[in-house]
């Protein structure tokens, strides 16, 4: 009897892993077309986030216009972490907000006041 229970557990784990891999492949396929015009680093982040366990709050990537250029804002998955801001050449500009104080690293203090043209580029819609 114990052997049967162990066998069923192993089979369930195997099927679950296959389903997770299938779900990741589907996410990557569905986002590949819609993200092909994004900077490579942003595309790579989407793949990386899709392979991780879902977060609460979910990962989101926004684009904005900031000082005349397109930038990409990546929200931190949880509390007291910095939110990241990248330019279209994949350079990290800084952390405009988040962290313990909520004010980021202080390198781009005008971001939240001057950003325009908000667009949600990608959101992890999986549930944790």
Image (cartoon, rainbow, N blue to C red):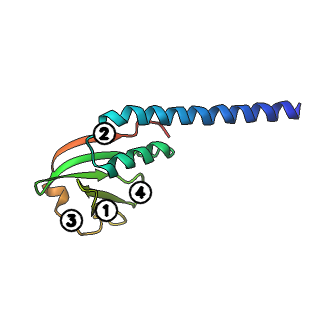
Cα–Cα gap, marks 4 and 3: 20 Å
Quadrant into which the N terminus falls: top right
Cα–Cα gap, marks 3 and 2: 26 Å
**Closer to the camera: disc 1 or disc 3?**
3
Cα–Cα gap, marks 1 and 4: 10 Å
* Residue at x 30%, y 39% (from the top left corner): 35
* Residue at x 42%, y 37% (from the top left corner): 28
Q: Residue beneath label 3, please?
A: 108
Marks 4 and 1: in contact by CB < 8 Å?
no
Cα–Cα gap, marks 4 and 2: 27 Å
Q: Tell which circle, 1 or 4, labels the residue nearer the N-terminal end.
A: 4
Q: Which of 28 and 76 is in front in this view?
A: 28
Q: Residue beneath label 1, please?
A: 102
Marks 2 and 1: in contact by CB < 8 Å?
no
Q: Quadrant location of residue 58? A: top left
Q: Residue beneath label 2, please?
A: 35
Instruction: Specify whether 93 is left or right of 80.
Output: left
Q: Which element type, helix, strand or loop, lies under badge 3?
A: loop
Marks 3 and 1: in contact by CB < 8 Å?
no
Q: Which element type, helix, strand or loop, lies under badge 2?
A: loop
Q: Tell which circle, 4 or 3, labels the residue nearer the N-terminal end.
A: 4
Cα–Cα gap, marks 1 and 2: 29 Å
Cα–Cα gap, marks 1 and 3: 13 Å
Q: Residue beneath label 4, please?
A: 79
Residue 5 x %, y %: 81, 32
Q: Tell which circle, 3 or 2, labels the residue nearer the N-terminal end.
A: 2
Instruction: Specify whether 51 is left or right of 33.
Output: right
């Amino acid at each position: 009897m114990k052997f049967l229970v162990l066998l069923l557990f192993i089979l369930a784990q195997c099927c679950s892993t296959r389903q997770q891999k299938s779900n990741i492949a589907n996410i990557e396929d569905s986002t590949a077309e819609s993200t092909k015009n994004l900077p490579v680093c942003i595309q790579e982040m989407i793949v990386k986030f899709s392979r991780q366990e879902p977060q609460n709050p979910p990962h989101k990537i926004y684009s904005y216009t900031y000082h005349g250029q397109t930038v990409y804002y990546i929200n931190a998955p949880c509390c007291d972490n910095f939110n990241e801001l990248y330019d279209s050449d994949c350079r990290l500009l800084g952390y405009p907000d988040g962290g313990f104080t909520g004010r980021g690293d202080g390198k781009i203090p005008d971001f939240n006041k001057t950003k325009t043209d908000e667009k949600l580029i990608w959101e992890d819609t999986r549930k944790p």
